[in-house]
Image (spheres, rainbow, N blue to C red):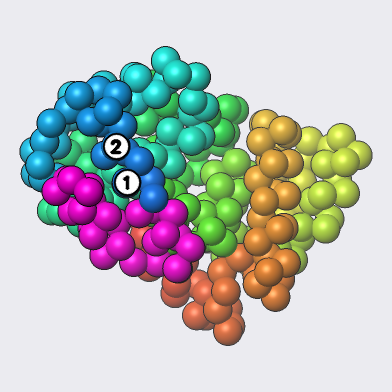
Amino acid sequence: MSMLEREMRHLAKQAGGAHKTVSDRMALAERFCERLVTELNVQIRYVRHLKARHIEDYIRHRLAQGIDKRTLQNEMSMIRIVLRQAGREKLADGDRISNRAVGIGGASRSGARRAIADGKYQTVQENARLKDPGLAAALELTRLMGLRSQEAVRCPQSFKTWRQALARGETRLAVVFGTKGGRPRETVILDTIAVKKALENAINIAEQRNGRLIDKADLKSAMDYWRGQAGNSV
């Protein structure tokens, strides 16, 4: 095992999260290091030597191999998390290695509403995807449907209704729980396919969490967690 691989695995583990999350992140880090050496002949020893051009070349090479954008977004998420753990926030959060800049932006956001600012959403979603799938699912629905914070936290209560409405081909969904002033409203669906996919993913996660995406004991705890993780992005 190279020095770079050992360090990246350590940083990937240090970032924390559920056991499977950490294990997956460490495996991605290991494969990233192996490909840098064997496929791109990049000879560096430490994360502090990793440059933007190395990452750009890596993603370009993977795209040429036909790897899909969602997979590469996950790999980039791991890279950014490792860089942040190493104290290299400037590179991790810089425009040069953003998903859009390296050619892997927009894989799952076609037609999405912009309820969340792009930059903040990307950062929060990438961390959530690796650390808390329920939070990631809620964020995705929020972005696609324009949900407000409490609407996002309480949205599992509407999953059955939304699924039925989408199956009927409806392009407007009723938002009932968590609305401002308790007044039901409708949200217009701009990308039905993306919403269906996000909804099914969210339903699968909620079924494993007693009907919740944000797995907390009560609404106050769930809202505190949501605000702490999503910050000013929603």
The answer to whether residue 169 is above or below residue 62 is: below
Mark-to-mark CA distance, 1 and 2: 6 Å
In the picture provided, is 195 more to the left or to the right than 170?
left
Residue matched to label 2? 34
Residue 157: where, in percent of width, then height?
74, 66
Residue shown at 72%/33% (left/top)? Answer: 193
Q: Residues within 10 Å of mark 2 (few under 14, many from 20)?
A: some
The answer to whether residue 119 is above or below residue 176 is: above
Residue 212 sits in quarter: bottom right
Query: Looking at the magenta stretch, what is its main secondary structure?
Result: helix
Residue shown at 59%/28% (left/top)? Answer: 111
The answer to whether residue 223 is above or below residue 189 is: below
Residue sitting nearer the eye, 214 or 220 = 214
Residue matched to label 1? 30
Residue that lies at the very extreme toward the right in this rendered image: 168
Amino acid under disc 1: Glu
Residue 225 sits in quarter: bottom left
Residue 227 visible to an observer of this rendering: no
The answer to whether residue 37 is above or below residue 125 is: above
Residue 189: where, in percent of width, then height?
70, 36
| 231 magenta-colored | no
Q: Which residues are magenta?
A: 1-26
Contact, mark 1 vs mark 2 (Cβ under 8 Å): yes
